[in-house]
Image (spheres, coloured by chain):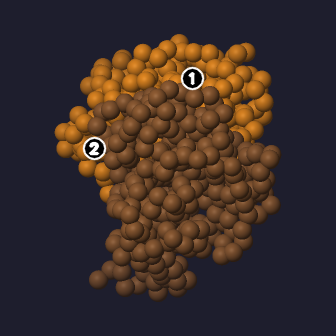
Amino acid sequence: MARPEASAPDAVLACGEVRTRLLPTRQALDIRSAAQFLALRADERVLLSERPALYARSPETLTGVDCPLPSANGSRVRAVGTVAARAALTEGRVLQTSAYFRLPSTGPDQRRPWGHYLVRPGVVEPFGKLLPEAIAEGVLGGGRPGDLDVGLIADGLLTRLLRHPLLDQRPPLRSRPTRLRWAALPAAPGAGPSLERFTLAEDDLRTVRLRVPPAIPPDRIAGLCDDLALHDWLLTTVVHLLDGVRFGAPEPSARPRPGDDRPAAVLALRPAVDHLLHLWMPRARVASELAPLWDTLERQPGFTRQWQALVQRIRDQLTLHAIPALYREAELTP
Amino acid sequence: MIVFAASDKGGTGRSVTSANLAYQRALNGDHVAYVDFDFGSPTAAAVFDVPSAVRGTRERGLHSYLEGGTPEPAMIDVWRQTEHPHLHAWPNQSGRLVLFPGDIGGGEFATDEDALERCVDLLLRLNGEFDVIMVDLSAGRSYAVDMALAATAHPRMRNVPFRWLVFHRWTRQHVIAASGLVHREHGIIRGGVERGHDELALRSAIRFVRAAVPDPESAVWSQGSPAQAAWMQSCDEALRRLAAEHAIGDSVVLGIVPLEPILQWREQLITEEDVLATQIANKETLEALEEIARRLTDDTYWGQP
């Protein structure tokens, strides 16, 4: 949608956080339900797309903020403006909420009326000058209590959506939500975008540091990071799924648990086949000027390479279980 | 599966036993969350041996979360953060064991609509992540019990399975009190029905755990005089009759935890090492805990007695 863009100095930093999780419903939402689910605003439509995969994205919502920016060097720069947030649903199955903002290098010395900020959606203006590098590291490292926390805004939107009556709260598999924080600094004049760092910080936290030409709007950068977060979540979820499976013949146990006669591997892997394996589609929703950043991750650590190995492993296990147990387990004791 | 751990009185071993059940499930490969809704006296940090990790979560415990003070409650990965000498290494093939601590110094509080919605948010989130969610509730007919009943009756929770364990010691007073907590006028069943639960379904989802039960047959008591043995035997029988009269007889008992010095004196997890290597815990205790943990999800032990 075209928006009245007020003239603002070029952004020197764009930051955001994406939350990614399985939609807690037994069946994936179809495109009409997805549109209903993501209708956050009456005045703007949900973006729907069926190629190359079912995808629905909510309109942007704005959250007013007035608080210090997180920073790695201890400086406390107050900033005022609005943070944009939106939610997306991929194949009616994976729910993401994404909050982001951009920062100009300088701002007014005092707070302006809200009208000033409302015509600059997704812009947060600092009081005085700021050091983009310190703020970027502050955002990625997590701020102190009271600092601007885009993760909380993404989380608030997620909490709101998860209360929707369309959800039956019967997830088909156990999985963990992930968080991906990102910060994009301006690329050197004339240089293209680059991915400087992709880190698995804690169990569920990833951080991404980018360099991006200043002309690229932050919602496109957020689009790239949503795509990275989606695929990282898929990898994480399938890895955990395989982690929990005890392969091979059941161990002789004094007290067998009920249901032990059913092949545990098949029961555990089935949800991946039903709900996850068809979702892998890197770059499907990434702006063309940012799509090359995926190549960095494909080279090292090799996202698609790992995915293919996982998919192959699941298929091999399921194939193996198509063989009657008598023959399947015959060679396991040397 | 959500499992609420309740008791009418303190000192029934509710927290330490439910923590041990959580530990046993995780050892068996389940992802387990232990949620400390014992608002009066959160003890889980001690049982899981994570005192310093809990100190780092001040102001971000479940109490603050439910009151809206913190949007995401603190969580502690027990395998990684425990100071328990035997738990340091994440056992192979075990699932996650995550503690959601209460706030230090947070007392009981009345729950409003917002707190209830947040409680439902949390339980649903955990339901998506964990196989077993063990919720330790403050003793008695507490606000925590109220909240558990209201949350499970909430329309958003209609597809989330839950069960109740009521812990009591094996004495006259405790048997009567435990029965009262469930069956009396303002008990769990009446309270649940008032909040929209189906009486039969709720009844079918409540089981009792007898804790700190001296077993007259056990080797521990074999040194006693014949008179003592006879007396214990008759007491035990009298208690069984009393329990049956108060509708908490054997048919609704999920398991019996023997009297165990470790659980009485130090409140800790009982590991295989405690039984096999150092021999400070009794084998029977560990077996009882393993068995109750297994029965939590074994449908043959649940339903209408």
Q: Helix, strand or loop at disc 1?
A: loop
Residue ID for mark 1: B67
Disc 2: which residue: B87
**In the foreground, B250 or A315:** A315
B43 in relation to A53, above or below: above
> Do marks 2 and 1 share a subunit?
yes
Neighbours of disc 1 within 10 Å: few (<14), some (14-19), many (20+): some
Which residue lies at the image location 72% right of the left edge and 35% below the top edge? B154
Secondary structure under badge 2?
Answer: loop
Which of the 4 image quarters holds residue B57? top left
Compute the Cα span from label 2 to label 1: 33 Å
Chain that appears orange: B
Q: Position of residue A33 (x, y in %)?
A: 78, 57
Relative to A49, residue B209 above or below = above
Q: Chain of mark 2?
A: B
Image position of A24 (left or right of A254): right
Amino acid type for the residue under numbered disc 2? Leu
Where is residue B89 drawn, in percent x and y? Answer: 26, 49
Give percent across and percent down for residue B5: 53, 30
Q: Nearer the viewer, residue A94 or A185?
A: A185
Q: Quadrant of residue B252?
A: top right
Q: Vertically, is B96 above or below B149?
A: below
- Kindly identify the residue that appears in the image at 56 percent across and 68 percent down: A287
Colour brown, chain:
A
The numbered dot on residue A36 is none
Work out which quarter of the rendered image holds the C terminus of chain B and state it: top right
Q: Indicate the position of residue A32 as horizontal and vertical percent values.
A: 80, 61
| Residue A93 in sight from this viewpoint | no
* Side of A225 relative to A122 (left or right): left
Q: Nearer the viewer, residue A25 or B47?
A: A25
Residue type at the position of mark 1: Glu
